[in-house]
Image: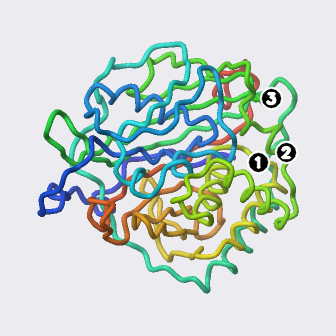
Amino acid sequence: MNASPSHRPHPAEWTETQSLLPSAERDLPAGRHQFHKEQMMARIHEDLRTSSRTSATSSRTPAASPVAPGKRSNPFLRRTILLPAAAFALAGAVVGGLALTGGRADDDKTALATGPALTTRIGAADAKGAPQLLERISLAAADTSAPTPRKGQYIYIASKVADTYIKTVGDKSEVVSDELHSRQVWNSLDGRDGWLIEAGQTSDKGITLKSDVPFSGAYNALAGLPTDPDALLRRIYRESDAVRDPEVPRDQAAFVAIGDLLGASYPPAEVGAALYKAAAKIPGVVSVDDAVDATGRHGVAIAREDSGNGERIEWIFDKKTLRFLGERIVVVKATADNPLKVGTVTHTSAITERAVVDAAKQVPGQVG
């Protein structure tokens, strides 16, 4: 399934704001945790960002449990599930320890931090509209002509991503944002092989994702998930309960897990449809009348707010086709645990292409 060519957000859609830190003095932590929900199963991007910013952040920064070298994470495991609200609202350097080969583009520099944070208009939320919208999205997901991958093929996902966070160097903290940049990921169906190319984070040639431990978010693993929404949701709760920090709300952890499976993978049509129906059963899920993805495409959204940090995760869909466009995380309420101002976009992403290819590093339409 292909998307139209991506483009930079129109200035009318994104506002750059210099003064996002609160005026009151506070002991800010060493940085801000990255909400790279895309590709949540691998968590490759967050681990790369961790290693690139560790030298610039203070030793006071909270850290999550390291991941063993060569290991890939559970499909329901995401850092916003592991970290309590205060930690993932304020943490900057999340220790990863993931063993990768290949080169980063810029040693230990924050190459993509380009200045003032992204902000946006907050769309109106409607709790009553969520079940009906999710039912329509589920039907659209089930009615797809996407090809079924064959043994030996790879799932290819291209996207545009950017983040806003608090960067600390020495005793100085400031709100910065990444330059919107491209990301390409390939994963084998069995989850044992893959490749990542990301502007500013890897070399132009990219890095291998090969591992002896299967990537649990791979196509074969997703194909084995229950297609009954109730059974699927029970499994999601069970898996996320096993890894989430107790301070992270149980329903929020389940919502995060479903969003990551939908946006960062290539689920079979019946599994994708079941995931949307399962999401409709989670308390606190709302519809949003307008949301904008990383490339400036407007759509409707399914969302849920984390009361602990006042941030709302929004899954964005095309208003006509209901095709998944991307995701963003927006500060919608001021809280004591989150120093960023209301309207700040802490993460934005847009899926520009999702396809099945014959080899790692092969792009759709290219002869292998």
Cβ atoms at labels 1 and 2 below 8 Å apart: yes
- Give the label, 1 or 3, closer to the camera: 3
Disc number placed over residue 190 in the picture, else none:
3
> Which residue, given by chain and number where applicable, does mark 1 sit on?
267
Q: Disc 3 residue type?
A: Asp
Tell me residue 271's x, y (percent).
81, 55
Within 10 Å of disc 1 (Cα), the crowding (few <14, some 14-19, many 20+) is many
The image quarter containing residue 157 is top right
Query: Disc 1 to disc 2, how far (Cα)?
Result: 7 Å
Which residue is outermost to the top? 102
Task: Tell which circle, 1 or 3, labels the residue nearer the N-terminal end.
Answer: 3
Q: Nearer the viewer, residue 241 or 355?
A: 241
Residue at left offset 47%, top offset 59%: 297
Q: Nearer the viewer, residue 213 or 176?
A: 213
Which residue is outermost to the bottom? 128
Q: Disc 1 residue type?
A: Pro
Total numbered circles: 3
Query: Disc 1 to disc 3, how far (Cα)?
Result: 13 Å
Residue at left offset 84%, top offset 50%: 225
Height in image: 235 above or below 5? Answer: below
Tell me residue 363's x, y (percent).
63, 28
Q: Secondary structure at mark 2?
A: helix
> Which residue, given by chain and number where applicable, does mark 2 sit on?
223
Tell me residue 102's x, y (percent).
50, 13
Q: Secondary structure at mark 1?
A: loop
The image quarter containing residue 191 is top right
